Amino acid sequence: METRRDVFQAIADPTRREIINLIAHKSLNLNSIAENFKVSRPAISQHIKILAECGLIVIKQQGRERYCEPRLAPLQEVSSWVERYRKLWAEKFE
C-alpha cells in the first residue's frame, strides 16, 4: 500500500527542513547536501526522496551528478494553514 505524502509530513522532520534551507537559494548535488549532516548518505537520500514525493524538490541529472532544485510553492499550503490560526491567536491575546 502506497502512502500519500504531503507537505506537512515533509516539514515535520528537522533534517528535511534543513535540507530545504540548504537548497532554497541554489541547487546542490546529493554529496554537497549530505556533507552538512552527521547521518548516513542513505538516510539523507531517503529524506530527499520524501521531499521529492511531496513536490518540494526536483532531482535533475547533470552528467554523473544528481542535483536537488527547490520547488517551494507547496509551502504556501502550510503558510495558509498557519495564517488562519495566527489570526485566531492574535484575537485571543488582544
Image: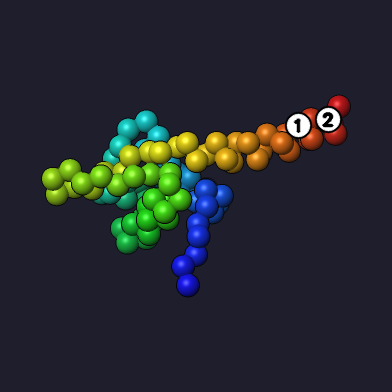
**Hey, which residue is sitting farthest left in the picture?**
63
Residue 79: image x %, image y %? 60, 36
**Residue type (three-letter) at the residue carrying disc 1:** Lys
Q: How would you rate the neighbour count of disc 1 (Cα within 10 Å): few for under 14, some for 14-19, many for 20 or more? A: few
Q: Which residue is mark 1?
A: 87
Check whether the beta carbons of the residues at disc 1 and disc 2 lie within 8 A of each other.
yes
**Residue 91: which numbered mark, if any?**
2
Residue 64 is left or right of residue 42, and the answer is left
Q: Secondary structure at mark 1?
A: helix
Work out whether residue 53 or residue 31 is closer to the camera in this orientation and state it.
53
Q: Residue at x 68, y 34 (%)?
A: 83
**Hey, which residue is sitting farthest bottom in the picture?**
1
Residue 48 is left or right of residue 8, and the answer is left
Residue 92: image x %, image y %? 85, 34
Residue 57: image x %, image y %? 38, 44
Residue 86 is left or right of residue 11, and the answer is right
**Residue type (three-letter) at the residue carrying disc 2:** Glu
